Amino acid sequence: MRIIVAGGDGFCGWPTALYLSKQGHDVTIVDNLVRRKYDDELRSNSVTPIATLEERVAKWKEVSGKEIKTFIGDLNHYDFLREVFRQTEPEAFVHFAEQRSAPYSMIDREHAVYTQTNNVVGNLNVLYAIKEFAPECHLIKLGTMGEYGTPNIDIEEGYIEIEHKGRKDTLPYPKQPGSFYHLSKVHDSHNITFACKIWGIRATDLNQGIVYGLHTEETRMDPVLVNRVDYDGVFGTALNRFINQAAIGHDITVYGSGGQTRAFLNIEDTVRCVEIAAENPADKGEFRVFNQFTEWFSVQELAERVHKIAQEEGLQTEVKKIENPRIENEDHYYNAVNTKLRDLGLEPHLLTDDVIRDILRTAVENKDRIIQENVLPSITWK
Ligand code: UPG
């Protein structure tokens, strides 16, 4: 299948591009390399030393014999996107190319406006490009479990049957996101729903949980193929962040009471979920939603698990509750459905102690790269 991976230089996109290429798909990466620029802006870095995209794809060709084509440019520039579609004629468009940090979107007005413009307009351009140049192309869009927020009822997969004043309908599940970033994904979902309805586009929204880990079978094939991993207060996410904190003997930073519960999955499952979506395309005009996660945990629970493994590895670290920089429920109900990907064959890699230990050892190997001043959160919602 001819597959575009937009955002193919990023944390989820790079391993996905490699995995799909290994499975024999004809993969093209589209990326504006902005994730590397956010590092410059924030004076931060990946814990692992990452190669340039050029070096990465050259090494992939050397070790696998397979070619990944690249287009460097921005989805917000329609002339560029048009050219990409003309030259590649995609059958599937995997869209990871969005600003994905909630704290980054909450820095100030400029960052909120940037996040929503970049994400919403970029995605709208992709919808128009599919309509104009590749109407059969299946859009596989990265949404987030954060679109739903933390309602006091079970979270369904995209839709919920409602009975109201004696009448019934199946409606989009209510969205109560917790940042301008998460809101951008909700706006995307609405635009995609409408485009499917009016133009008959086929789309799958992958409402992904928090991804942990970094290695996949393919990224382990050579040090030049290594994936990035974030630990800082802006782009680092709960579990990976805790593990990197432990690696340098820093306190493990639980925000508030730590009762916040979130859905999680291993990066090795991310790549497989995208493959499952690609191999089982949505019907014409269908806006399909998969909840893409394998387990859920409270942040306190995760902090304690990391602490235990860190102690076994001889590292000195403590779990520390700090003032929550976000405005969010810290004590809430959480029960989310995730049967659709499982029904299509996903076999989850669950979070075992060995998985935590493996990520921790990679962090320890690279611990000299961690910039201490970036570890604590610096952005508040207030
Ligand atoms: N948290 C802590 N301590 C930390 C970092 C986070 O307690 O040091 C808490 C935070 O308050 C929140 C939860 O952990 O309640 C999750 O935060 P985080 O791991 O930063 O995830 P999100 O902000 O939800 O965003 C990530 C990705 C986003 C994706 C989403 C999927 O950045 O792109 O959409 O996970 O759920």
Image (cartoon, rainbow, N blue to C red):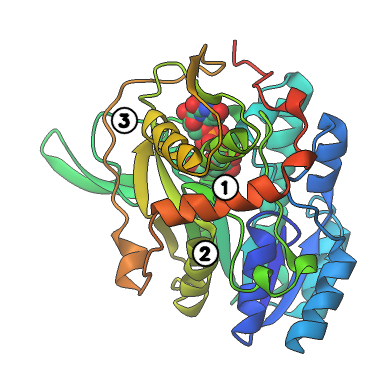
Q: Which quadrant does the N terminus fall into?
A: bottom right
Q: Amino acid at mark 1?
A: Leu
Q: Can residue 183 be seen by looking at this rendering?
A: no
Towards the viewer: 162 or 13? 13
Secondary structure at numbered mark 1:
helix
Secondary structure at numbered mark 3:
loop
Query: Which residue is painted at 61% across and 74% down in the image?
Result: 19
Secondary structure at numbered mark 2:
helix
When the figure is inspected, residue 124 is found, relative to residue 370, above or below; the finding is: below
Q: Can residue 225 be seen by looking at this rendering?
A: yes
When the figure is inspected, residue 95 is found, relative to residue 60, above or below; the finding is: above
Look at mark 3 in the image and give the residue it sits on: 151
Q: Which label's residue is closer to the chain start, 1 or 3? A: 3
Image quadrant assignment for residue 308? top left
When the figure is inspected, residue 321 is found, relative to residue 363, above or below; the finding is: above
Left/right placement of residue 310 relative to residue 96 reads left
Q: CA distance from mark 2 to mark 3?
A: 28 Å
Left/right placement of residue 271 relative to residue 65 reads left
The label on residue 178 is none
When the figure is inspected, residue 44 is found, relative to residue 324, above or below; the finding is: below
Expressed as whole percent of the image width and height from the top left, the position of residue 242 reads 54, 35
Callout in the foreground (1, 2): 1
Q: How many marks?
A: 3
Q: CA distance from mark 1 to mark 2?
A: 16 Å
Look at mark 2 in the image and give the residue it sits on: 268
Look at mark 1 in the image and give the residue it sits on: 360
